[in-house]
Image (cartoon, grey):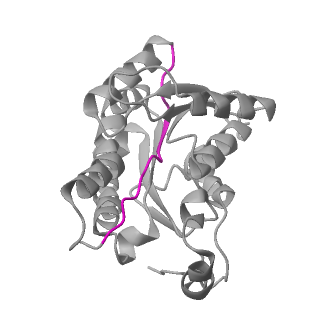
Amino acid sequence: MSVKRTALVTGGTGALGTAIARALHDAGHHVLISDYAPVGQTELSAQAQQWLTEQQQDGYDFTAYAIDVSDNLSSQQGIERIHNDGHSIDILVNCAGITRDATLRRMDFEQWDSVIRTNLNSMFNMTKPVIDGMTERGWGRIINISSVNGSKGAFGQTNYSAAKSGIYGFTKALALEVARKGVTVNAISPGYLDSPMVRQVPQDVLESKVIPEIPIGRLGQPEEIAAGVVFLCSDLAGLVTGANLPMNGGQHMY
């Protein structure tokens, strides 16, 4: 029987975050999620509260915290609230992310900076406050959600691709630092998923340009990525650290 542990999923109310939170809950873990709130605000948004209600109706009992993962102080204070509530984080899934697409010639600094802070700086902001607890207890799992576009690049996504590529270096270096402490650190790189973010792409573009580049001939499902997260969080995955698990339907093989 697997040991019940406490997991924190950042960006937990998104399509992928929800699938991951549910899968970890189904695996027997106690699941906390973070949802975006402006710096200094600790109250959950009405949207997050509605999400919690809907999840509870489906049998999922999550605890949510308002945190701006792109801000170091907000992240520190959020983790402090979690600790003050009596939780010790055994599993951290860094899933929060945004896009602000534009070609570099048209991209302004805010578009660059917001993506780097949310998608890459958040790795430091959320991992730093929990890593010591994991090493002291001699067990931990950190899963960083990257992207196929972090390895192959994407037109109009210099900011996103740079941030997602940076996650690989962060993952490998931290894995080396904590390997002898019972903590594993891995990345997962999803391809294009059937999610609201991807569905913003016009249907004709999806059908004529995106899906034809995916050898399996379809978008991925968030639940498929979540299954990979659950495995990497398990005791049986203790041999896997510093790795990237590409889950992209064969779109980019490496």
Is residue 3 among what the camera can see?
no
**Residue found at the very far right of the displayed protein:** 58
Kindly identify the residue that appears in the image at 33 percent across and 57 percent down: 167
* Percent of width and height locating residue 11: 50, 42
Q: Principal SS element in the magenta part? A: loop
Is residue 109 among what the camera can see?
yes
Q: Is residue 87 magenta?
A: yes
Position of residue 100 relative to residue 31, above or below, is below
The residue closer to the viewer here, 175 or 70, is 70
* Percent of width and height locating residue 52: 66, 30
The residue closer to the viewer here, 37 or 116, is 37
In this rendering, position of residue 172 left or right of residue 25: left
What is the span of residues highlighted in magenta in the rendered image?
Answer: 86-102
Kindly identify the residue that appears in the image at 30 percent across and 48 percent down: 174
Position of residue 219 relative to residue 12, above or below, is below
The residue closer to the viewer here, 98 or 79, is 98
Quarter of the figure with residue 149: bottom left
Is the C terminus in the top left, top right, bottom left or bottom right quadrant?
bottom left
In this rendering, position of residue 165 left or right of residue 206: left
The residue closer to the viewer here, 138 or 79, is 79
Quarter of the figure with residue 180: top left
Position of residue 198 relative to residue 71, above or below, is below
Q: Does the magenta stretch include residue 233?
A: no
* Percent of width and height locating residue 73: 27, 27
